[in-house]
Image (cartoon, rainbow, N blue to C red):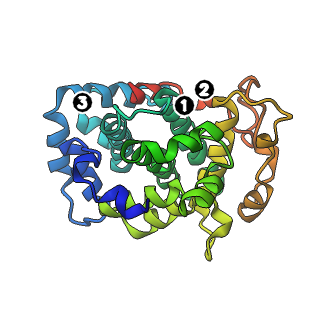
Amino acid sequence: MDIQTLLDQPGKLPTVPKVTQKLIESFSDEDASIDDIARQLAADPALTAKLLRLANSAYFHVSRTIGTVDDALRMLGFVMVRNLVLGNGMVTAFRNTAGLDLKQFWRHNLYTACGARWLARKGRGNGDLAFTLGLMHGIGQLQMHAVAPAAVAPLDLQMNVLAAGRAELEKAQLGFHYGDVSAELAKLWNFPKPLIEALRDVPQPLASAEFSDAAGWVHLGAWRARIEVLGLKADDPACAYPAEVGKRLGLGPEWAAAPDASATDDDDDVMPPLKVLTEGLDAMLN
């Protein structure tokens, strides 16, 4: 099996809603009409209801109720609205993927996205880009399980798809890892080149010839999310801090509080508990 085999099967490629496809196209279309996209969003009552529910969640701390798509675009910005709809579109597109605990998988992606956004903003980077990457970084796993379940089933028996060593195992057994597949899907959907390259680098950011801060933030976000989602104990080897990645980003382990730590308002250098950091966005997973 190779990556091209995973993609050269039109009947097994994920089908994303039309408005989500339009939003994907906007990544590389500088002339994309936000008004046109807003009208398409508003024409879908179910999607509009979910978007407004997300926009009014505790995550955004908005000062007044967001009641329309236009309000959401104005208050949150086009990029974040696109992220919310894109995330919902990915969940919908891969809803019937077998062989995975999808609830656990998407919770990990959501935790990763919010954690990466927090880290990027702490590092004065592009938080919205980190959020997008966090949501999208695992889609290669979904495509692999949808198209080649027999090939990945033995790997699943050896190791959870969310485990820290999963990419290395896939590389050794298949010749590529889920990040490579995620990147190829993004290329197929005409995502911009920097985002495609970062998706490829997330599982092993130090292996790239040119280190990507965005991939590094998502890698650290995924590490932090993994500990909580998999319920790992402190003495588990998988809990070891990715020190070399952190070093490249100027981040020691001090930012990562224990998973069950109480939220604090007086320490901006410590990431809030992920359940707090993602409060309200779990509606995206339904």
Question: Measured along the vertical axis of the image, is residue 118 above or below residue 173?
Answer: above
Residue at the (75%, 43%) spot, across then down: 269
Residue at the (35%, 41%) spot, across then down: 90
Q: Is residue 237 left or right of residue 127?
A: right
CA distance separating discs 2 and 3 = 24 Å
From this viewpoint, is residue 159 visible?
Answer: no
- Residue carrying label 3: 48
Circle 1/circle 2 CB separation < 8 Å: yes
Question: Measured along the vertical axis of the image, is residue 175 above or below residue 69?
Answer: below
Q: Nearer the viewer, residue 140 or 150?
A: 150
The amino acid type, in three-letter code, at marker 3 is Thr
- Residue carrying label 2: 275
Q: Which of the marked residues, 3 or 1, is nearer the chain's N terminus?
A: 3
Q: Which of the marked residues, 2 or 3, is nearer the chain's N terminus?
A: 3
- Position in image of residue 79 (x %, y %): 37, 50
**Marker disc for residue 127:** none
Residue, far right: 235
Residue at the (57%, 63%) spot, across then down: 201
Q: Nearer the viewer, residue 156 or 217?
A: 156
Residue at the (62%, 44%) spot, across then down: 222
**Marker disc for residue 278:** 1
Q: Is residue 125 left or right of residue 148?
A: right
Q: Nearer the viewer, residue 179 or 22?
A: 179
| Quarter of the view holding residue 245 | bottom right
Give the structural element (helix, strand or loop) at label 2: helix
